[in-house]
Amino acid sequence: MQGLKDIETRTWKTKYRGKLLIVASKHPKTDNSGLALCVVDLVHIRKMKPEDMAGALCSYFPNRYSWVLKNPRRIKKFNVIGRQGIYNVPNKKIKYIRK
């Protein structure tokens, strides 16, 4: 986790605000595939704007939503049997790394 992204883009929005565990997708295959990477705070969701490209590290997609993230916290990486959407992961699995 380098804290380079402060925006995630999605095709859907949610009313949820709060802690969010960031999990890398299993595809495409990378060193972090299927791993929980960090915890962030989801603070706001809005329609994506062209100026969101830098924070999202992606191209502009006018039909997507920008999920604004703050306060990234490093954790010890662990495997997650993931799925799309927001779901619960037991808190005991999350081990924060102190700076």
Image (cartoon, grey):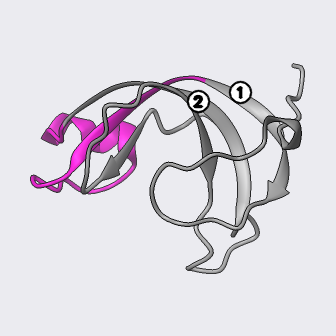
Residue 52 among those drawn in magenta: yes
Q: Which residue is pictured at 25% across the width and 37% down the height?
A: 52
Mark 2: few/some/many CA within 10 Å (<14, 14-19, 20+): many
Residue position marked by numbered label 1 in the rendering? 73
User: Which range is magenta?
Assistant: 47-71
Mark 1: few/some/many CA within 10 Å (<14, 14-19, 20+): some
Q: Earlier in the sequence, mark 1 or mark 2?
A: 2
Is residue 24 in view from this perspective? yes
For badge 2, the amino acid type reads Val
| Marks 1 & 2, CB-CB < 8 Å contact | yes
Question: In the picture provided, is 36 more to the left or to the right than 19?
Answer: right
Q: For the residue labelled by badge 1, is the local secondary structure a helix, a strand or a loop?
A: strand
Question: In the picture provided, is 33 more to the left or to the right than 97?
Answer: left
Residue 61 among those drawn in magenta: yes
Image position, residue 18 (x, y; %):
51, 23
Q: Which residue is pictured at 62% across the width and 75% down the height?
A: 26
Viewer-side residue, 64 vs 87: 87
> Is residue 31 placed above or below 53 in the rendered structure?
below
Q: Which mark is residue 40?
A: 2
Question: In the picture provided, is 80 more to the left or to the right than 51?
Answer: right
Q: Which mark is residue 18?
A: none
> Is residue 84 placed above or below 39 in the rendered structure?
below
Q: Which residue is pictured at 85% across the width and 29% down the height?
A: 96
Looking at this view, name the residue that lies furthest to the left: 62
> Is residue 2 placed above or below 87 in the rendered structure?
above
Marks 1/2: CA distance?
A: 6 Å
Picture quadrant of residue 99 = top right
Q: For the residue labelled by badge 2, is the local secondary structure a helix, a strand or a loop?
A: strand
For badge 1, the amino acid type reads Arg
